[in-house]
Every structure is written in structure tokens, then in C-alpha cells.
Amino acid sequence: MSKILAALVLAATPVVATAAAESYTLDPYYPISFSGDHLDMATVYGHFSKISGKITIDRLARTGAVDITVETASVDTGDADKGGRARSRDEHLRSADFFNAAEFPTMTYKATNVFFSADAPALIDGNLTLLGVTRPVKLTIQRFKCVPASGTTRERCGGNATGKLKRSDFGMKYGIPAIGDEITLLVGFEATKD
């Protein structure tokens, strides 16, 4: 009797599909951009041109992972020519006053949690490590879409994300408050399924 009862319970239990995480490699040709205030007059825009990383998505379980590495020496604000100055703005940003690229050649971002809205990731809680200091930074995904990659059978996903941080939280205090403390991150990304 107990075997029949167990069989009936198993038959009545809904089948749960097995979740499958899918891994994607970030396209390095989509730089991570940023903006910050300068002297209460203008906003300075820049980007990091050398990035690498992976994104993992499990749509069924509604989970994900993000692991990004950025080369700090690739910072570019469009001011690489020093002209009559001692150094250009980009040279100054690479110095110990800011990113200290010689001692800290990379910064990293690793997700601690990915939150979904419907079938797409919408918010990322993660940790940014910059200048040897790790602090939480949230990214809001404003758009996310996946399509077949051109000329292949692999899927390609991409979108836009934004976030804010205070550079002083990472020990980067040079020029505050004349040079703004709050930095806005603007991340456009595309990644192809491995």
C-alpha cells in the first residue's frame, strides 16, 4: 500500500525543469563610460577602452553572475595632448592622485546578486575593487535584449546599465570638492554566448 501511495504522490508532483546557466563573453569594443563634475562648471566625460569579462545568466532560476576586469591605464577623457601643460588630464588620471595605474593596473567588478524583472536582469548588486579597496556598487539595467549573433547560431545579449559611486570611498580624494566626488557610470555592453 505504501508503494502505491508513494507512486501516486510522485505522479501528482509537477515536473520541475532543470535550470541551466549560460555563459557569455563580453565584447571588448564597448567601453565603460563615466562622468563627473569639474569646478562646478562642466561635466567631464570619459571611458575605459580595455575591458574583459564574463556574464552568466540562468533565466529559469532567475539568477546571474557578472565578472568584469578594467585596465585603469586605458582611461580616456579626450585630453591626451598636454600642449604647454606639465601633463594632460589623462596622464593625471593615470597618476597616484587618481587611478594609480602603475600600482593598480586593474579594477574589477563582481556581482553578488542579480535581480530579475520578468525574464530579464534588472538590477545588480556587486563589489567594485579600485585602488585595492572593495566597496558595494549597484548597477541598474535599463535595457536588456538577446538575439541570434550575426552569421552564427550563438546568442548575443546586450543592454545598458547605470550606477553611481563616490570615489572617496575608494581612497581617491584628490581635488575634492572642486573635482566632484560622485561619479556616474554609464555601461553599454554586448556579449556573445560561449
Image: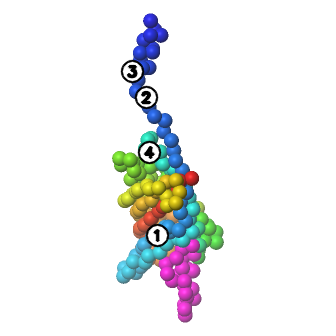
The residue identified by callout 1 is 33
Q: CA distance from mark 2 to mark 1?
A: 45 Å
Which residue is painted at 41% across and 23% down in the image?
13
Tell me the element at label 4. Answer: loop
Q: CA distance from mark 2 to mark 3?
A: 9 Å
Q: Amino acid at mark 3?
A: Ala
Above or below, comparing residue 10 to residue 139 in the picture: above
Q: Amino acid at mark 4?
A: Arg
The residue identified by callout 4 is 59
The residue identified by callout 3 is 12
Q: Amino acid at mark 2?
A: Val
- In which quarter of the view is residue 99 placed? bottom right
Badge 2: few (under 14), some or many (20 or more) residues near its Cα, within 10 Å? few
N-terminal label among 1 and 4: 1
Badge 4: few (under 14), some or many (20 or more) residues near its Cα, within 10 Å? some
Q: CA distance from mark 4 to mark 2?
A: 17 Å
The residue identified by callout 2 is 15
Is 86 included in the stretch rendered in magenta? yes
Q: CA distance from mark 1 to mark 4?
A: 27 Å
Q: Mark 3 and mark 2 in contact (Cβ < 8 Å)?
A: no
In front of the other: 57 or 156: 156
Which residue is painted at 47% across and 62% down in the image?
189
Which residue is painted at 51% across and 64% down in the image?
170
- In which quarter of the view is residue 163 placed? bottom left
Task: Give the residue furthest to the bottom.
Answer: 84
